[in-house]
Image (cartoon, helix red, strand yellow):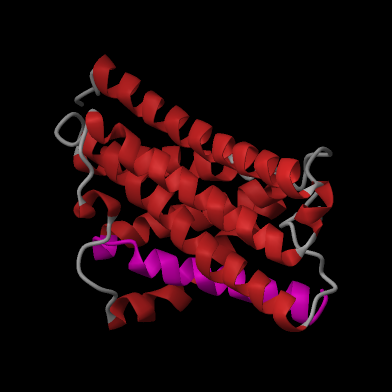
Amino acid sequence: MKRAPKSSVFGIVLMCLWVLVSVIASQFVIGWLIILIFGREALSQPVWTAVYSALSYSVALVLIIFVPRKITKTSRSELGLTGWPTWTDVGLSPVAFIVSTLLAAGLVALFSIFPWFDANEAQDVGFNIYMSGGDRIIAFLTLVVVAPIAEEIIFRGWLYGKIREKLNGKVPERVGILISILIVSVLFGAIHMQWNVGVNVFCLSVVLCVLREITGTIYAGILTHMVKNGLAFYLLYVLGV
């Protein structure tokens, strides 16, 4: 079996660190600026929470995609954004959502044997659950539209595409796919900084990476991610579950 050369391993580690630093730094800088200019209480308001999320994602996307262009160019193919969404993408999204949900349920049940794992720990998404009207619409656009698009471009788009390119020809194709899926999914889970959420989104990421391999784009992944976040939004902000 071929082994990836040290230069490829080093490059993959650097890319993962770049994504991690870019996402965290953008959140910190944008959050700090909003607090500095408008006060800490601003981030408790839906409008400013949405602005914070949108700007954080925008800065992270710019840093991740455009800053490294001086070293290596990023094509639309690497981002998984070639062509347009198809009916196949639409049809695969509910199937992928069901598969990821079942996979997550099984992994969460497995992790639940550990005393430090709280399967029911609530995730803080930045919005108060007692919202209505315009505030709820703002939260919906942020969580169900902006977040899935940005996260898919960053993780299943740029990072997955770059890792696959790095491993192409260095290891057998199936091994390269498996390594790419695991690296992207572990990082995606870790960046949510909460065990139960991390396990859940790890399973989601695995399925979304497979979708990218099947379709060649991230459109089905974006739709699946939207379905998942949309259902969570409905349960949390409409039903209050």
Region rendered in magenta? 214-241
Work out whether residue 96 can be spotted.
no
> Horizontal placement of 219 versus 172: left or right?
right
Viewer-proximal residue, 222 or 114? 222
Q: Check residue 184 for magenta coloring.
A: no
Q: How many marks?
A: 0
Q: Tell me if residue 57 comes above or below residue 25 in the rendering.
A: below
**Image quadrant containing the C terminus:** bottom right
Q: Tell me if residue 46 comes above or below residue 65 in the rendering.
A: below
Outermost residue to the top = 6
For image coordinates 53% across by 74% down, the residue present is: 227
For image coordinates 74% across by 44% down, the residue present is: 35
> Horizontal placement of 160 versus 84: left or right?
right
Q: Position of residue 7 (x, y in %)?
A: 25, 17
Outermost residue to the front = 37
Viewer-proximal residue, 55 or 114? 55
For image coordinates 26% across by 65% down, the residue present is: 215
Q: Tell me if residue 11 comes above or below residue 120 in the rendering.
A: above
> Horizontal placement of 141 versus 157: left or right?
right
Q: Position of residue 218 (x, y in %)?
A: 34, 61
**Image quadrant containing the N terminus:** top left
Q: Check residue 232 for magenta coloring.
A: yes
Viewer-proximal residue, 162 or 128? 128
Q: Main secondary structure of the magenta part?
A: helix
- Res. 105 image quadrant: bottom right
Work out whether residue 42 can be spotted.
yes
